[in-house]
Image (spheres, grey):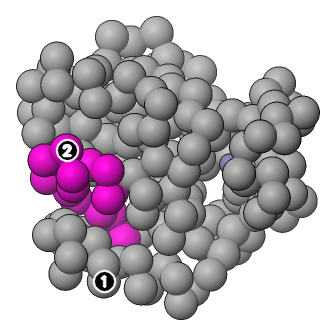
Amino acid sequence: MRALLSIDYTVDFVADDGRLTTGHAGQAIEQRLVDQTQSFIDAGDFVVFAIDRHDPEDHYHPESQLFPPHNIAGSSGRALYGSLAPLYEAQKNRENVYWIDKRHYSAFSGTDLDIRLRERGITEIYLTGVCTDICILHTAVDAYNLGYRLVIDADAVASFDAVGHEWALRHFEQTLGAKIIAKEE
Ligand code: ZN
């Protein structure tokens, strides 16, 4: 069994005026990310939207020292970006679609993701979203340590940092044993 994780593809991380945006790189993966998400949902695979959620007054959070406020609970910046938003709205009541509010980079950190995957017998995780070298990377490392097989869709992940993006793709393949797929295949 397999699952697709859709990570942080929100206005703040993708739109031109997002608070912590990947800009063009993030916008360029929209169609591929949406197509992959829809095909997993249609196939009955488990699809998890793991989305950053911060509180403006959370001064204990380490990210408050590192990044400007982003993905604030209830803000328009936390909305899913582009055509992923209507897709989620249309599909969110399906049994195989699940939303997780995450507080750290990794979708596993402080969430019930591992339990949700294990109870469905899922052993393989497809990662999509942003940023390749931050939230995708930390989620991939945790998944690796928990024994999941990883597939990274190189055309459905992006970063504001092109060097970090390329480094992370190499790390997924060479160090985490991930399979890297792309549009052409
Ligand atoms: Zn964050």
Mark 2 neighbour class, 10 Å CA radius: few under 14, some 14 to 19, many 20 or more: few
Image disc number at residue 146: 2
Return the x and y of residue 141 as percentages of the image width and height: 32, 58
Please state if 150 lies on the left or on the right of 164 as rendered.
Answer: left
The residue at the point 62 percent across, 65 percent down is: 26
Please state if 31 lies on the left or on the right of 175 as rendered.
Answer: right
Q: Amino acid at mark 1?
A: Arg
| Residue at the disc numbered 1 | 170
- Which one is in front in this view, the residue at disc 2 or the one at disc 1? 2
Mark 1 neighbour class, 10 Å CA radius: few under 14, some 14 to 19, many 20 or more: some
Dot placed on the residue nearer the N-terminal end, 2 or 1: 2
Image disc number at residue 28: none
Q: Residue 114's image quarter? A: top left
The residue range painted magenta reads 140-154
The residue at the point 59 percent across, 21 percent down is: 89
Return the x and y of residue 170 as percentages of the image width and height: 30, 83
Query: Is residue 123 located in the magenta-colored stretch of the structure?
Result: no
Please state if 120 lies on the left or on the right of 78 as rendered.
Answer: left
Q: Is mark 2 within 8 Å of ligand 1?
A: no
Asked whether 47 or 28 is in front, the reply is 47
The residue at the point 82 percent across, 35 percent down is: 58
Please state if 176 lies on the left or on the right of 162 as rendered.
Answer: left
Residue 72 shows in this picture = no
Query: Is residue 143 located in the magenta-colored stretch of the structure?
Result: yes
Q: Count the numbered circles shown.
A: 2
